[in-house]
Amino acid sequence: MIIRRAFYHWQFIAAGALPLWLLVGSAIFGSGAWAVLGIFFAAVLIGFGLLLVALLFYARKEVREARALSYADVGVLALWHALIIAVPLSTDAAGWLSVLVIIGGIAVFWFAVWELFGSAKRRMRAMVDLVEQTARGQSAPAGPQHPLPYASPNISKPAPTFARGNTPDVIVIEEKRDRP
């Protein structure tokens, strides 16, 4: 759980730190001026990609509630971040590593979209099940997985209050038909 929570916070820090590492690391480990300029533009795009993926992971309700990523999220992010960190360290393989970083970024993006839609599908299925059970007259199953605030048996729905005690106001509208 500690690793999952650490990656939850790290993913937002990484959107700024890893592009900065690309620039500083490539300058330190002997890339030329033109290579550093090219890496600058790539670092900006990678920074936007990292931020977009972090926001897609953050969009899932279970991630926000637990303040922790899933183990699959941690795995794909760790691989992608390791590839980004390795680019400035090896000037000989920087071209192939750059291609792997781009392919990995696209794969992580679609993985995050897939996880987001899967989460929404599960929540929608739970909502439909709840509506169907309520329509059949059954009680709602207890548990924290229900998105409705009063679905849990521990929380009671407040009773409605009306103006005159417990009797509701009734309005009677008489209709007159012009036709016989």
Image (cartoon, rainbow, N blue to C red):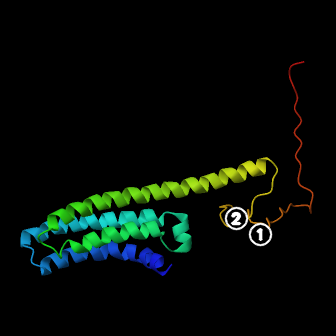
Quarter of the C terminus within the rendering: top right
| Residue 63 screen position, x and y as percent | 51, 68
Q: Residue at x 42, y 70 (%)?
A: 74
**Tag 2: amino acid:** Pro
Between 47 and 29, the residue placed more toward the observer is: 29
Is 92 on the left or on the right of 12, as rendered? Answer: left
The first of marks 2 and 1 along the sequence is 2
Q: Which of the 4 image quarters holds residue 112?
A: bottom left
Q: Residue at x 80, y 47 (%)?
A: 136
Tell me the distance, in whole angstroms, between the alpha carbons under discs 2 and 1. 8 Å
Is 177 on the left or on the right of 87, as rendered? Answer: right
Q: Would you say the residues marked 2 and 1 are in contact, meaning their CB atoms lie under 8 Å apart? A: yes
What residue sits right under mark 2 in the picture?
149
Which secondary structure, mark 1? loop
Between 16 and 176, the residue placed more toward the observer is: 16
| Residue 53 screen position, x and y as percent | 38, 63
What residue sits right under mark 1 in the picture?
155
Q: Residue at x 7, y 72 (%)?
A: 33
| Residue 126 screen position, x and y as percent | 65, 55
Around disc 1, counting alpha carbons within 10 Å, would you say few (fewer than 14), some (14 to 19), or many (20 or more)? Answer: few
Q: Residue at x 45, y 79 (%)?
A: 3
**Tag 1: amino acid:** Ile
The answer to whether 146 is drawn above or below residue 17 in the figure is: above
Which secondary structure, mark 2? loop
| Residue 93 screen position, x and y as percent | 15, 68
Q: Which of the 4 image quarters holds residue 122?
A: bottom right
